[in-house]
Image: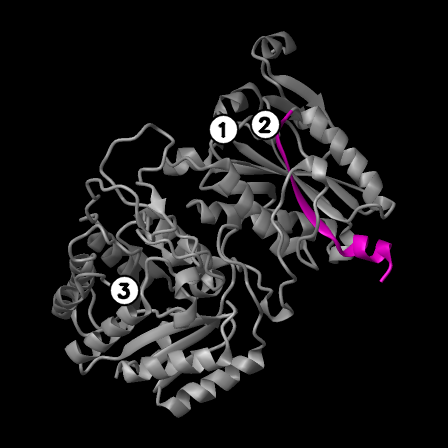
Amino acid sequence: MRTENLIEKSFAVCDCGLTDFQETLREQQQLVEQRRNGQVGDTVLLAEHRPVITLGARRLINEVLISPEALAEQDIAVAQIRRGGGATAHSPGQIVFYPILELRGINLSVGQYIRELEAIGIELLEQLGVYSERREGLRGLWVGGKKIGFVGVRVSRGITYHGMSINIQNDLAIFDYIVPCGLEGVTITSVLAETGQEHSMAEVKQRLSGLLGEHFANEGFVENRPEMGKMRTAGKLAPWLRRRLPAGGDYEQTANILSSLGLETICVSANCPNRGQCWSRGTATVLILGNICTRGCRFCSVPKGRPSMVQVPKGQANVAPFDCAQGKLATAKQSLPPDVSEPERIAEMVKQMGLKYLVITSVTRDDLPDGGASHFRDCINKVRSEVANIDFEILTPDFNGCQERALKILGEAGPFVFGHNIETVSELYPTVRPGGDYQRSLRLLKLAGQSYPDMPIKSSIMLGLGEADKQVKGVLEDLRRAGCSRIVIGQYLRPSKDALPVVNYVEPARFDYWKQEAKLLGFSWVLASPFARSSFLAEEEQMS
């Protein structure tokens, strides 16, 4: 293959760090020419900017409310640029991304490209706990009546530049000096203003890089130009795994209900690829006991540490360090108890969404004496007391050190489908699940079957981490011997930069094979496909 063909298919995400706007503008202009001449592939620049007000090509909506001298006194620069839209502002803590793409190569019109930018912004904000939306006739993203994301693009002979900015935790006072995008009286907001939670900008860039690759990279991530810093690399995503996040009425209604009630979901915390499909059907898997896990599983993107009541400075995580090498907490602090309001909020969610089947899962809480079992029980019993004719499925941690006690407590909330994921083959546990134990998980499933002889016992495994067929067959046999009657088999997909890489993508036909093997081994219910996850389509199961 010729070099120019390799360049045409390449895709790079480059972190410019904290820069002056004009410096990044010059970089964009240079890349546009290089992209047009075939010297580089599609490239996206990520940046934070020192305080600057930028004025777009539509002069009638470029309204600055104070004098240039007053802006200069506050070290706020002003830049007149050739992009769509009116006045906007940038400052540290706002993420800005500038795609330099050949539209013909990604088969998008200008309008479709702008919608794609907005879709990326929606997905990023969801991962940060904010549910945003488009507004008819207005570019950008909105949280209720407040604007959080801004789009201004230019296309030069088929090559895009400029792009989108999203307020994460920037000082919003700079917007008081302009009429943002020419919209009188609009309120500007940020992730910090909406959630009260600060984020590492490095983490935000990692999440954004992954989304940009999913939406725009045809051949995965390739080498980055060394002067622009480091980037993450990944192989080509199998074509059967490409999926867009839907929007629409049901999806947005689910997002709004979860946001208004302040509920965590595994859909967001674990970057589940099925979030769009589930939320569009009006279902979600509730994540209880907080969103910080006391284990260091390397396939998962849920934050690790210890939920603690110790006061820490603003902007620092309220968790104790996690020793990944030892698979345990590095320090012992007073644990944060379960949120007593959570059962009531879950019950309200069930009523608002009209659910008849609820899946509840949790982070691992080794810091709690019963592993959180009593909170599972309280959530189920509260929902059942307020909603008639509802079935439950629970997906629990392994309750290390308290399995018998936990199962006795959970029994007070039966009936339900009891689920605990074995996740992978025993040989990969030291790499994939530090802090976990293969035999401990099998023991929990066996004890659950003995404790609840009339309830289904369910587990799940991932493929694509380097396991051999013989090992997969072995774990299925072990699960059957432990009394497991339901099994989910899905493709491992890397949820974040820090997670384990995918070793191989398993073809759909191979999942059909494992489905038949599982049935031959005696599983009464099998879900096996690339996107299969332990709680996906759970509402379609039959209680038996």
Q: Amino acid at mark 1?
A: Asn
- List x then y, in percent, for residue 409: 13, 65
- List x then y, in percent, for residue 420: 30, 69
Q: Quadrant of the C terminus?
A: bottom left
Q: Which residues are magenta?
A: 1-19
Which corner quadrant of the image does residue 266 belong to? bottom left
Q: Nearer the viewer, mark 1 or mark 3?
A: 3
Secondary-structure class at tag 3: loop
Dot 1 or dot 2: first in sequence order is: 2
Residue tagged 1: 170
Q: Residues within 10 Å of mark 3 (few under 14, many from 20)?
A: many
Dot 2 or dot 3: first in sequence order is: 2
- The residue at 34%/87% (across/down) is 524
Q: Nearer the viewer, residue 124 or 445?
A: 445
Asked whether residue 258 is drawn in magenta, I would say no
Q: Is residue 91 left or right of residue 158?
A: left
- List x then y, in percent, for residue 374: 15, 59
Cα–Cα span, label 2 and label 3: 44 Å
Residue tagged 2: 90
Circles 1 and 2 in contact, beta carbons < 8 Å: yes
Q: Nearer the viewer, residue 529 or 165?
A: 529
Asked whether residue 13 is drawn in magenta, I would say yes
- List x then y, in percent, for residue 523: 35, 86
User: What number of labels is visible?
Assistant: 3
Q: Residues within 10 Å of mark 1 (few under 14, many from 20)?
A: many
Task: Decide: is 142 above or below 519.
Answer: above
Q: Is residue 422 visible?
A: yes
Q: Residues within 10 Å of mark 2 (few under 14, many from 20)?
A: many
Dot 1 or dot 3: first in sequence order is: 1
